[in-house]
Amino acid sequence: MNVTSKDGTTVAYDAQGDGPALILVDGALTTRKSEYRPALVELLQPHFTVIGYDRRGRGDSGDTQPYSVEREIDDIDALIARAGGRAYLHGQSSGGCLAFEATRVLGAGKVAGVSSYEAPWNDDPAAQDAWRTYRRDLVAALRDGRRGDAVALFVRLVGTPQEEVVAMRNMPFWTGLEALAPTLAYDAEVMGPSGAVPTRRLADVAAPVLAVCGGSSPSFMCDSASTIAKAVRDGRSRTLEGQVHAVEPGAIAPVLIEFFGGLERGTRAA
């Protein structure tokens, strides 16, 4: 199915299940058809109408230029309108950063609650230096049409050893990643120029927030989740022991069902 965003961009989405709308917001180099998605949707759809969509520039969605984070928020707004004017948001990785910003802009009237799994903001100064270098090199690679190099920059940034990156570039799936390479610049805009937790902006998020991290992920992920929860008006954080950034659907789904389900019961009681 498709919905048309404010600037005329076509946004492709799937809707499965029954109940209040829950929109899944993907992170870098992923689409609504990525491998992790079906298992997560299967677990969530008995409780929610689960809406998975292709962020602009990905999969079956359009990519009207110039890019802006505001236009990505318009895409989410269009999906919420299609869902009846009210929805929950869950963002994976940098998709969590976008979900928070969308909630800040659209307000609690449209976004009834928002969660993230490892929104990868990092308050460590050394990490912020690395982020600025990555953004600079990414711009150069995309400007020169070096999509493979752009993907390699991202994969190295998230900790993949150089020898593994070399091997990955010869694997069949790499072509699919190169097709998504321009959207790495979009995620970089969502994350911000420093890559630090934007506490002042998060203070304007009025909807209830749940920031989740994996206990076996790098420690900054849980530090950032805690910072996010403290920065918003109504926030909480949770650690899933044994989980890493590629969280298992069976680990995250019960947490989302509990959080959003509790908010929905509270709304009905009110």
Image (tube, grey):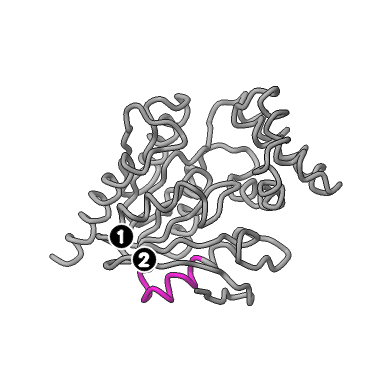
Relative to 74, does residue 69 appear above or below in the rendering? above
Question: In the rendered structure, which amino acid carries the disc numbered 2?
Answer: Gln
Using a 10 Å C-alpha cutoff, classify the residue at mark 1 as few (fewer than 14 neighbours), some (14 to 19) or many (20 or more).
many
Name the mark on residue 45: 1
Residue 155 in picture, x, y percent from top left: 64, 34
At 46% from the left and 70% from the top, the residue drawn is 79
SS type, badge 1: loop
Quadrant in which the C terminus is drawn: bottom left
At 82% from the left and 44% from the top, the residue drawn is 146
Q: Main secondary structure of the magenta part?
A: helix
Total number of numbered labels? 2
SS type, badge 2: strand
User: Was residue 81 drawn as part of the magenta stretch in this picture?
Assistant: yes
> In the rendered structure, are the residues bearing label 2 and label 1 in contact, judged by CB atoms less than 8 Å apart?
yes
Using a 10 Å C-alpha cutoff, classify the residue at mark 2 as few (fewer than 14 neighbours), some (14 to 19) or many (20 or more).
some
The stretch of residues the image draws in magenta is: 76-86
Relative to 32, does residue 15 appear above or below in the rendering? below
Nearer to me, 109 or 217: 217
At 38% from the left and 63% from the top, the residue drawn is 111
At 65% from the left and 42% from the top, the residue drawn is 193
Q: In which quarter of the image is residue 12?
A: bottom right
Relative to 52, does residue 142 appear above or below in the rendering? above
User: Was residue 119 drawn as part of the magenta stretch in this picture?
Assistant: no
Q: Return the residue at label 2.
A: 16
Q: In which quarter of the image is residue 59?
A: bottom right
Return the disc, 2 or 1, that comes first in the chain's sequence. Answer: 2
Compute the Cα span from label 2 to label 1.
Answer: 6 Å
Question: In the rendered structure, which amino acid carries the disc numbered 1?
Answer: Gln
Tell me: 149 left or right of 26: right
In the displayed orientation, state which residue is furthest to the front.
Answer: 172
Residue 165 in picture, x, y percent from top left: 69, 29
